[in-house]
Amino acid sequence: MSTFNPSTSNSRSKTQKSRLLVGEETSLILEAVPEAIFFLDHDNRILLLNPVAQQLVGQTRDVIGLGFHDLIGCFMSGESEVAQCPFTRMVDTGELVVIPSHFWDREDGTQFELSLSFWPKTQQGVLVGGMVVVRDLTDTMEIQRDVQRAARLAEDAPNPIVEFDATGAMLYANTGMLNVMAQCGLLEAGIEVMFPAVLPAMLQECLTTNSALMRVEHVVADRVIAWSLFPLEELKLVRAYGLDITSDVALRRAKEAAEESTRAKDIFLATMSHELRTPMNGVLGCAQLLKDTSLTDQQRELIETMHRSADALLTLVNDILDFSKIEAGKMTLEVADVNLGSLICDVTTLMEGLASRKGLTVSVQIDPDVPEEFRGDPIRLRQILFNLVGNAIKFTERGRVTVTVSLKQGRTEGSDSVVLQWRIQDTGIGMTPEQQVRLFRAYAQADASTTRKFGGTGLGLMICHQLVQLMGGAITVESSIGQGSTFAYTTNLLPAIHRDGSTSSLGTDQRSMGEQVGLLRVLVADDNEINQVVACKYLQKLGCHVEIARTGREAVEAITRTTYDVVLMDCEMPDMDGYEATREIRLREDGTMSHLPIMALTGHASDEDAQKCHQAGMDKVITKPLTLPILRASLRELLQQANS
């Protein structure tokens, strides 16, 4: 037994009525067309709608019997006409009425853009209603607006945009392109001048490979344009985007010029370092050797003067090199064992001569709780103290210079560093507050007369300031005119690692200069005769047997014939330099148990040069000028390493 469904009956009734209105075949057509179609009676009420129209108004919404104007709500009007419903216009005129665009908000809030055509329907010449064909323009118009926006963006873009077809013919150039051509004075010259001469090949490559060509630079007039080409594969077009990089190129060239200038300066400084240190090695070495001979008082005084002058020149060279490192941000610190007492003794011993000639007293006070051993950079610690004590003596005519070292209390949480407080106090000429402000700047001294009276470059204190900062500390000065000055600074050092039988890395005791190292067979490889003489005399004083090689190749051949205990290898030699000679020696040792200690002698003082020596296989690096204490200590260190 079937159940009666009023809804189904009503739907069937409407369908049957619709088919009666439009006919069976027309009904099938209405279901197939993509437009929404509404059939209206004479009173504007909806009699029938096709599936597309039902989907437009909402699948579940029943609009049969509803006034079409109430549903859609569109009006039309002319320049002098009152707004009127288009259906009413159609009824009045009996003619087709078209609304090209009408925005309609559906009941659920969805907005559509519609195109509506109102067709009159007559029977036996009498108007009985109408048919409205509605086309949904929403997606089409949005796409069209997107295209228009894209075109507008391209046209309004300040940078050049050009399109080419597959033959290389220009199809489009935006206003930005024309503006650039006008600025270059090339409007009459044609688009081609704005591109590289190989443009056809570039276009062909872009289309053939279907890949972009990025930032192809082209110089035109006083501009540099970077072109990026993108293929539009489906259209067989290439779009070119230009960017004016004139200022970028200028900056890049300025940067390259600055880098080249820096490289040239580095090479110049390295060359000057080597060229100055080589003759200074001869001057200081010969002066030291002369001091150990029988001399009259006058001769000894002249030798002392010569030695001090050479030392001053060496200090100047070192200051300039350190300053260049600081400028380049290449100043680094080493970590080694430091014996505090030996370090301070070494500095005060070196300064004894200058202080005694002025009748000054140099005293040292180290607090009892200050440990004797630390880890830090002994060379830079010595340099800071040497500079500050040297300045104190230089600017003090009467009285004393006092060096005080204490332990700064209060460690930073999580840090095992030990902070030392250093104070160098003098009774010298002092400074005004204005002079103190300028003190740690490059090339700065108290005033211009200071350089004329006392000498110096004004780099020493700036270098001290930078070194103290690298050690995590700070440096200050307190001074009054005529009352002397006190320089105070802190350094962060690491606790010492205690080893049995260990010795300080700062083992330069001036009083043990005459001690010998033993009967060693040493090969000196150096092409400079003065350096040969100095090295040979020093080694002979230390009890060594010495032989000479003038090139790296001679050194390699000598080692093949004779067994040596140590080689002193100059880095810069003709035919084969010290680096290549060392690599050759290490290559021959490969696979054997032998290892010949090689000590580099170099006029270059940078960390990069020291690293280059170690990479070549050298065991130790000594920077010229060579001194007897350093040579003796280095030989002992090498022998200790060889025997361990």
Image: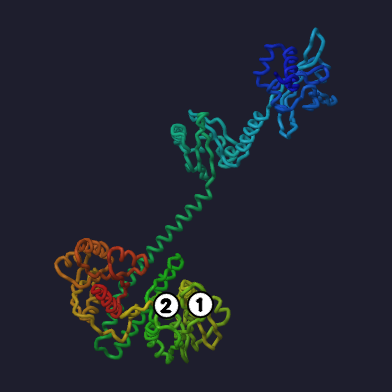
Q: Amino acid at mark 1?
A: Arg
Q: Is residue 121 above or below residue 334?
A: above
Q: Residues within 10 Å of mark 1 (few under 14, many from 20)?
A: few
Q: Which mark is residue 411?
A: 1
Secondary structure under tag 1 reads loop
Asked whether 5 or 520 is in front, the reply is 5
Residue 298: percent from left, percent from top: 30, 89
Kind of residue indicated by mark 2? Pro
Compared with residue 359, is residue 507 higher up or lower down, i.e. above or below?
above
Cβ atoms under marks 1 and 2 closer than 8 Å:
no
Image: 175 above or below 70:
below
Residue of label 2:
495
- The first of marks 1 and 2 along the sequence is 1
Picture coordinates of residue 627 (x, y %)? 30, 78
Circle 2 SS class: strand
Residue shown at the point (37%, 74%) measured from the top left: 336
Above or below — where is 577 with respect to 17?
below
Left or right: 269 in relation to 72:
left
Check the picture and name the quadrant holding the C terminus: bottom left
**49 and 104: which one is in front?**
49
Residue 129: give x, y in percent of width and height: 80, 16
Where is residue 135? Give x, y as percent.
69, 24
Outermost residue, front direction? 1
Q: Is residue 442 left or right of residue 14?
A: left
Q: Quadrant of residue 316?
A: bottom left
C-alpha gap between disc 1 and disc 2: 12 Å
